[in-house]
Amino acid sequence: MMPSPYGSRPKPSGGFELAAWLFMRVSGILLLGLALGHLAIMHLVNNVDVIDFQFVSKRYAGPFWRIYDLFLLLLALTHGMNGLRTVVDDFIQRPPLRVGIQMALYTLGFVLLILGSFTILTFRPEQFVNAAAGAP
Amino acid sequence: MSLYRGGSGMVSYYLHRLTGVGVLLFLWLHIVDITLIGWGPKLFNELLFLYRHPFFRVLEVGLVAAVLYHALNGIRILVIDFWEGATEYHRQLFYAELILFALGFLPAAYLMLKPVVGRF
């Protein structure tokens, strides 16, 4: 797909592609706050020197950051996978190869979505309380 | 794949795709590393040496650059798509985007690299 001279993707005329085009814009707006907020908190206010198991345990003690992270995960992964789908459609022309790669990407996206949601929703730091007692 | 007449539209479009795929690759890795927290503090904290390595700290600055560019260029695309008059100013919008990128990225990179400098 050729971009418009202004660097945006031409608006599809209808069907699934139009819905996907619109989804990219709506999820993009939501991700402006969610993703930039996440980066600012994790890499500017804090950094990887202070982020560890204890940090995540405290952060996940209440529901707020779990819900925040769940929305960020769902939106970022679907936004990213759909973006990659359009890139693959553009660069890989041969149908059997393209369909194979798309199937693999759908599977990977689904597995990562389940894995990430499961972790955010089921993480219980209490169960490691004895193991964590000795940690600094 | 053919290159068309180029200009800021083409540059911004390919940068948008490049940064998008780059951020997605990091997201895949990030989902896997956070999943490991379910195995408890020992494994999770031991693996953090990876993210604390100076090489990774510099890559992290690249991640911030990619997300920031993708976000600002995404805003520019929204303006172009939903406000018809904006196509007249698309080049100015791109330059404004680059200025905003520099204003956001340079302080962020400074804050992120300050604790790392001297550890190389």
Image (spheres, coloured by chain):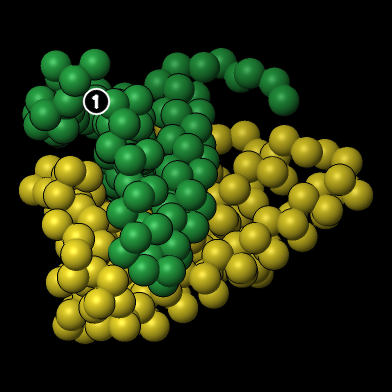
Chain colours: A yellow, B green
Residue B84's x, y, as percent? 35, 47
Give the labeled residue for mark 1. B98
Q: Residues within 10 Å of mark 1 (few under 14, many from 20)?
A: some
Res A61 quadrant in image: bottom left
Q: What's the residue at 47%, 38% (across, down)?
A: B22
Whether residue A22 appears in this view of the structure is no
Residue at 17% across / 43% down in the picture? A49
Percent coordinates x, y for residue A72 in the rendering:
34, 65
Residue under the point 63% across and 42% down: A87
Q: Is residue B116 left or right of residue B57?
A: left
Q: Nearer the viewer, residue A33 or B34?
A: B34
Q: Between A107 and A84, which is closer to the camera in this rendering?
A: A107
Q: Residue at x 61, y 69 (%)?
A: A110
Which quadrant is home to the N terminus of chain A? top right
Left or right for A32, reference A2: left
Residue nearer the viewer, A72 or A86: A72
| Residue reaching furthest to the right | A96
Query: In the rendered structure, which amino acid carries the disc numbered 1?
Result: Leu
Query: Relative to A79, does residue B119 appear above or below in the rendering?
Result: above
Q: Return the x and y of residue B23 as percentages of the image width and height.
A: 43, 43
